[in-house]
Image (cartoon, coloured by chain):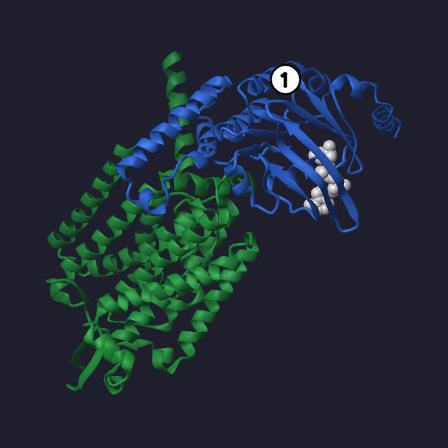
Chain colours: A blue, B green
């Protein structure tokens, strides 16, 4: 069963066709990778799916419900969360507080209840804190809980972003280059982590340039070039796909 | 965490009482007048602190909301509605008990709004205005937002200055006292100066508790996340537009409440209360207070307003606040009394004493 279905999605910026007529599905419980040269439109596609951009044409179905046209916070509320290619942790907040924001959609206190610190909001706060600590524990970041998030080492910031997205308990997780800037050891750990997340039952759609990571963990791979889908297959077949080889070799020639 | 909050509030209560006793025994009771006025001004400032320091949205128009509160309640409690008493709406209000008659300066009977009714109308109006302008304006960021709110402030200023019914350049005077509860009234009359000092501070303390609760709640955290990375906040399911708007409206409500109370306390209001310089002053105080620091905002709000009202800044009054703003932006753009600054100072101190112990 497909958890995500993208149909004929297009988006241009001025004269530039960043995403053109892209269709694909993501199977529930799988890891799907989205690869392609720089500027191929991968991040744009993520922005279209997560509500940061509106498509010119086409549709996005999440659990058979259309989500294109919704605001990002509404998409998040449906159970789809994401990380960013350029890390966007909350400044001046601790790691724990960053993760606690991930619990936002699972909690209820609003302005009035917050202003009067009603007893049930205190219980809710406690639950938010405990769940967030669990997630930090799971990712091995609990020692950094009280450090300012943006003061962490780069690799830890990537993990913190992942933790924050996981705290939403999403059904589908979009990861935009989670291994960018990581060293080899960290990349291998990230790969293991993503596989574990999938094993928890969370579907993952990942954009990544690191081929070893992509080939190791993905169930399926889509290749994007100049905004168009040129391949959509299992890793072994992608490695042998002549069109894909041409696009990547062509890039290296340049 | 929660206990610390209430200990701080207890500290504030003790300080309020200590100051009053001090003025009593040193025979400096006249200072209570300015301390009362400063208390009301600090309501604007703590509300603005929530907006600027926590939600990260600037407003250079909050004197406008203060003035809306002050002017509407002043107008409704001084304007004689007797000539309109046959008007369907006015007679309806009169029958509902929202109007009251009293004697004017010359002994004639006039029909005015009950201060409570005027207060509610004034705050409601400010809230509606804040919703209407906040919706479109809060889509802007940074200096665009600053300019748009500045524009709003200028419009309010020009309206109160140019409206005959609002007394134009003279403003509105002869505003009656505001009986909050039987025996508790907001007025500048000398015999009840001490009571008014306490009334003002009880209001401030209640508002502080409400805001401290809020910033330590799920909402407060969401507001800080908007400040920290708005896109990411939205991606985490925070309805950033709604939260920014609610915070803007809440801070406008605080400003208008301050306007209502201070106008009754002073017995009037003038157009300078709506001036852009006042808005700048409020922002400057939030900045010295440390931006995301409600206690800093409150302390600075009381201190600087008190000094200003006592005339310590002389003819340079407005210039002092402009100067403060420039200095802060140059040397401490993230605010002066910053909480994290205290933390790192404390950390540094601990490290130093640690290493001393080791050697
Ligand atoms: N908001 C925008 N306005 C204008 N052009 C944009 C915008 N976002 C992306 N583009 C352009 O669209 C194209 C696709 O960009 P996108 O960021 O989606 O590529 P990408 O595949 O994620 O690349 P990378 O691997 O470098 O992250 C690029 O040419 C980019 O300059
Ligand atoms: Mg990208």
Q: Residue B301 at what x, y percent from top left?
A: 33, 52
Task: Locate residue A253: give its quadrant.
Answer: top right
Number of numbered tags placed on the structure image: 1
Residue situated in front as seen by the camera: A132 or B177: A132
Q: Residues within 10 Å of mark 1 (few under 14, many from 20)?
A: many
- Compared with residue B325, is residue A212 higher up or lower down, i.e. above or below? above
Q: Residue B176 at what x, y percent from top left?
A: 20, 73
Q: Chain of mark 1?
A: A
On the picture, is A179 further left or further right than B247?
Answer: right
- Residue position for label 1: A191
Residue situated in front as seen by the camera: A148 or A247: A247
Q: Residue A239 at what x, y percent from top left?
A: 80, 19
On the picture, is B269 further left or further right than B228?
Answer: left
Q: Quadrant of the C terminus of chain B?
A: top left
Task: Locate residue B39: give its quadrant.
Answer: bottom left
| Image point (39%, 49%), residue name | B49
Task: Locate residue B85: give its quadrant.
Answer: bottom left
């Amino acid at each position: 069963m497909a958890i995500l279905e993208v149909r004929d999605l297009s988006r241009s910026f001025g004269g530039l066709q960043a995403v053109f007529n892209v269709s694909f599905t993501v199977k529930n419980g799988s890891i799907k990778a989205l690869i392609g040269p720089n500027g191929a439109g991968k991040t744009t596609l993520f922005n279209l799916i997560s509500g940061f951009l509106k498509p010119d044409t086409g549709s996005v179905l999440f659990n058979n419900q259309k989500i294109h046209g919704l605001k990002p916070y509404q998409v998040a509320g449906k159970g789809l969360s994401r990380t960013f290619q350029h890390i966007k942790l909350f400044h001046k907040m601790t790691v724990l507080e960053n993760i606690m924001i991930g619990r936002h959609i699972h909690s209820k206190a609003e302005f009035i209840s917050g202003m009067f610190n009603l007893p049930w909001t205190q219980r809710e706060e406690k639950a938010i804190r405990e769940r967030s600590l669990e997630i930090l524990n799971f990712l091995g970041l609990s020692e950094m809980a009280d450090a300012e998030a943006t003061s962490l080492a780069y690799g830890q910031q990537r993990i913190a972003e992942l933790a924050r997205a996981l705290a939403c308990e999403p059904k589908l997780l979009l990861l935009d280059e989670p291994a960018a800037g990581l060293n080899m050891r960290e990349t291998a750990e990230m790969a293991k982590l993503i596989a574990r997340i999938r094993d928890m039952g969370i579907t993952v759609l990942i954009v990544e340039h690191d081929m070893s990571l992509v080939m190791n963990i993905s169930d399926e791979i889509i290749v994007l070039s100049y905004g168009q889908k040129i391949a959509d297959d299992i890793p072994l077949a992608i490695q042998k796909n002549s069109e894909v080889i041409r696009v990547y070799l062509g890039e290296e020639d340049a | 965490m929660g206990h610390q909050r209430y200990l701080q509030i207890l500290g504030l209560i003790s300080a309020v009482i200590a100051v009053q006793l001090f003025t009593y025994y040193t025979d400096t009771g006249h200072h209570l007048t300015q301390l009362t006025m400063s208390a009301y001004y600090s309501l604007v400032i703590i509300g603005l602190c929530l907006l600027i320091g926590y939600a990260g949205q600037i407003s250079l128009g909050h004197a406008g909301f203060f003035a809306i509160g002050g002017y509407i309640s002043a107008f409704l409690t001084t304007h004689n509605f007797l000539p309109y008493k046959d008007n369907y709406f006015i007679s309806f209000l009169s029958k509902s008990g929202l109007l009251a008659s009293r004697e004017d300066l010359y002994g004639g009977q006039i029909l005015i709004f009950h201060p409570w009714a005027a207060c509610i109308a004034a705050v409601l109006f400010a809230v509606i205005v804040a919703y209407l302008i906040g919706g479109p304006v809060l889509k802007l960021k940074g200096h665009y937002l600053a300019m748009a709110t500045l524009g709003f402030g200028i419009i309010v200023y020009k309206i109160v200055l140019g409206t005959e019914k609002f007394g134009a350049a003279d403003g509105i005077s002869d505003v009656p006292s505001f009986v909050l509860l039987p025996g508790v009234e907001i007025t500048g009359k000398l015999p009840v100066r001490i009571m008014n000092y306490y009334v003002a501070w009880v209001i401030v303390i209640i508002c502080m508790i409400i805001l401290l609760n809020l910033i330590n709640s799920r909402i407060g955290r969401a507001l800080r996340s908007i400040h920290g990375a708005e896109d990411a906040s939205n991606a985490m399911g925070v309805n950033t537009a709604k939260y920014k708007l609610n915070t803007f409206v809440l801070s406008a409500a605080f400003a208008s409440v301050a306007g209502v109370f201070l106008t009754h306390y002073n017995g009037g209001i003038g157009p300078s209360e709506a001036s852009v310089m006042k808005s700048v002053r409020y922002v400057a105080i939030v900045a010295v207070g440390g931006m995301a620091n409600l206690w800093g905002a409150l302390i600075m709000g009381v201190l600087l307003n008190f000094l200003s009202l006592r005339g310590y800044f002389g003819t340079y009054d407005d210039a002092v606040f402009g100067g403060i703003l420039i200095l802060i932006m140059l040397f401490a753009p993230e605010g002066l009394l910053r909480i994290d600054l205290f933390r790192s100072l404390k950390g540094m101190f601990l490290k130093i004493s640690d290493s001393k112990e080791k050697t």
